Image: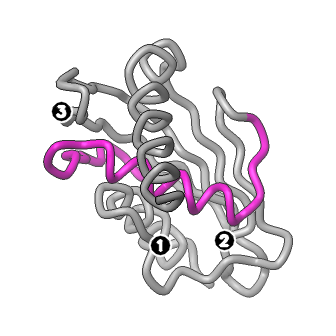
Amino acid sequence: MTVATNKAIAEAMVRSLATGGFGSVEFSPDFWAWTLTSGRLERSEFLRRVGLFSAVFEDSATIAVDTVTGDEDRVVVQFRVVGTLLTGAVYRQTAAFMVEFDARGRVRHWREYFDARIVAELLLPAMKALDERRADQRGR
C-alpha cells in the first residue's frame, strides 16, 4: 500500500468512530490496540469499545480532523471530538491516534493518545453505564 492509501484508511477509521464501526477495514491476524486508560486490547474488545464510544452520545459525536501525517507503515491522525454524552455532560477531547499497517496494508496496531483525565471523568463512566444497561437488557 502507498502512504496516501494508508493515510486515507487511518483518517476514515478516526472519522468512523462517530458511527461505531470501521466498515471494510482489514485487520491483521496479530492486531492489537493500546490506549492510555485501558492498556493493550485484543481486536474483539477494541471493536466492542468502539461501538460503545459511538453509542454514548445523545447525537453522534462531531469529529474534526486537524492533521494526517504518515511515513510508510505508520500514520498519525490528530483530531478533535465534541458531543453531548447520554449523561448530559459535554465531552471535548483532542487526540492523536497512530495506526500501523502490515506489508499487505492491513491494520496491525492502533494506539490512542488523549487527555486521560477527561476520559476517566466523563467518557468511561458513560461507557460503563451503557455497557451495564445493555447487559441488563440481555439478561431479561
User: What separation in Å lies between label 2 and label 1 (alpha carbons)?
Assistant: 9 Å
80 in relation to 5, above or below: above
The percent coordinates of residue 69 (x first, y second) are 49, 52
54 in relation to 66, above or below: below
Q: Which element carries disc 2, helix, strand or loop?
A: strand
Left/right placement of residue 66 relative to residue 31 reads left
The quarter holding residue 15 reads: bottom left
Q: In the rendered view of the protein, which quadrant contains the N terminus?
A: bottom right
Which of the pair 72/126 is nearer the observer?
Answer: 126
User: What separation in Å lies between label 3 and label 2 (alpha carbons)?
Assistant: 30 Å
Left/right placement of residue 126 relative to residue 116 reads left
* 18 magenta-colored: no
The percent coordinates of residue 138 (x first, y second) are 49, 61
Mark 2 residue type: Val
User: What separation in Å lies between label 3 and label 1 (alpha carbons)?
Assistant: 27 Å
Which of the pair 123/113 is nearer the observer?
Answer: 123
The image's mark for residue 84 is 3
The answer to whether the residue labelled 2 contacts the one labelled 1, judged by CB atoms less than 8 Å apart, is yes
The stretch of residues the image draws in magenta is 39-68
Q: At 43% across and 81% down in the image, what residue appears?
A: 23
